Image: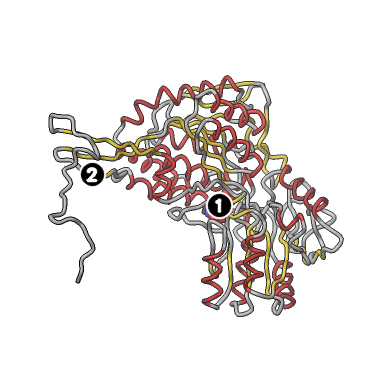
Amino acid sequence: MKALSALIGGRKIESNEDIFESLNPADLRDVVGRYASANKKSCREACETAREALAGWSATPAPVRASVLHNFAQLIEKNKVALAQLVTREMGKPIREALGDVQEAIDTCLFFVSEGRRLYGHTIPSEMPLKELFTYRRPVGVFACITAGNFPVAVPSWYFIPALLCGNTCVWKPSEDTPETSHAFFKLLTAAGVPRGVFNVVFGTGTVTGAALIDLVDEGLIDKVGFTGSTEVGRRIGEICGRNLQTPCLELGGKNPLVVAPDANIEAALHGTIWAAFGTAGQRCTSLGNLILHESIKKKFVEQLIEKVTSLKIGEPKSDDIFYGPMISEKFLKSHEANLAKLLEKHHNILTIQNGRITKSNGWREFSGDAEHGCYAFPTIIDNIQATDEIYRTETFGPLINVMTYETIDEAISLANGTGYGLSSAIYTQNIEFAYRFKTEIKAGMTSINNSTTGAEAHLPFGGNGKSGNGSRQSGIWVLDQFTRWQSVNWDVSGKLQLAQMDTGYISPSETILPYQF
Ligand code: UN1
């Protein structure tokens, strides 16, 4: 039986190639959606359709484009609970987090709507008379974007809201883990008034549809790429874009450090650690990877950590009081299990007794889900990690953290910076010098002082350095530089040819410039 594979120019494309199902990770018997992977032909058609729509959309006044995004915000607000419930059902994050995911899209809309009335250029004085200089932000063109499933509403909104506001047209390959949520996102955007062909979707897996879409950069059908996902895939996309002289937006992995100093507010640090480590079952790119504790507080901190973690409520994400739900899908659970099998070394000390998959026979004390049909994992804490260990520098994307110790500030900063990634980071301390040094010397794109590693806000730049990205940022006004190109215009009304640098009429000093003899 055929399934939906693409939404192009207001048309639904169906196919029976590479069918995939999106399953509720809290109950794998619940099929949330059935889709087909769009092939290269559909990807090409989507890009060509976006290209055809570009002239009309880019000529639409920016405040009018913004009004569509205002409608979008209102529609999301009206459907907030239903959309959040769909997010929870499709990818398993607890309902309060799903509501936050949806709220982030609303915040992003509200922020950029007023940018539609700014999108400022400049009026610049010329060095010659009767001549004026101007700058304008012009759209980049066709924007193709591949997103992950962990923030199925917030992250696409980070890309598409500014991209559309700036007059670009789009082709979106959403995660194969959240096609139904992505379809709902499309429906709301269409209902908000985005004209046909301006926003197109190709469903599918990364290997089939994602790869086919990115190939089209080489065919000249795409002007800008956005990608949120693994460093490995990001690197490949960067290579393809690079040879086409394009700079993609790459938001990649992280191995985010959280340092706790001996003078820290320990209770706050414990809460921040647990949230950073196990919130969203550790499946945020900003999740905690390496917990770096001062040796003097380590023993006590770890004891309290284990005690608190032991009483975390894991289970059915629909419940309001759940700390974390299932992994995004079975694939993520398997990868978590594989990490446990692959990255643990003899000298590691696993502080948690139960690790890996939560099952009916091997249950969690505070568990409320269906272990037999859901993809649940225990929280894992591994001690005695060394900077030479593979697990220290490998993103694990699950409920798993490493514990390390430090003696000096230099050592803490060096451990925080040593993984090759540089997305998020955090420090808990009351020591001003340490906090100052940390924020100045950390290589990560984002840092928290006395707060967890996760929890970006919709108007602050989000993004990383090193293996976490290529320096592109999302959120806030700076994103306008990703989705527009500066055009410089000079206008000469003198009626004659005036030559820059030559016909400038600079005034010479009345005396020869010599050093004065005072
Ligand atoms: C991601 O995991 O890709 O700051 C994005 C945070 C979220 C976004 C994470 N607002 O953790």
Residue 222, horizontal then vertical, whole percent: 49, 28
The image quarter in which residue 205 lies: top right
Camera-side residue of 444 and 453: 444
| Most distant residue in the front direction | 517
Camera-side residue of 270 and 453: 453
| Most distant residue in the right direction | 346
Residue positioned 55% across, 46% down in the render: 470
Residue 141, horizontal then vertical, whole percent: 42, 31
Tell how many labels.
2
Residue positioned 74% across, 76% down in the render: 299
Q: Where is mark 2, residue-wise? A: 123
Q: Where is mark 1, residue-wise? A: 464
Residue 413, horizontal then vertical, whole percent: 62, 67
Instruction: State the mark number for residue 507.
Output: none
Camera-side residue of 209 and 504: 504
Q: Amino acid at mark 2?
A: Thr
Q: Is any part of residue 322 visible from this angle?
A: no
| Beta carbon of the mark 1 residue lies under 8 A of ligand 1 | no
Residue 175 falls left or right of residue 77? right
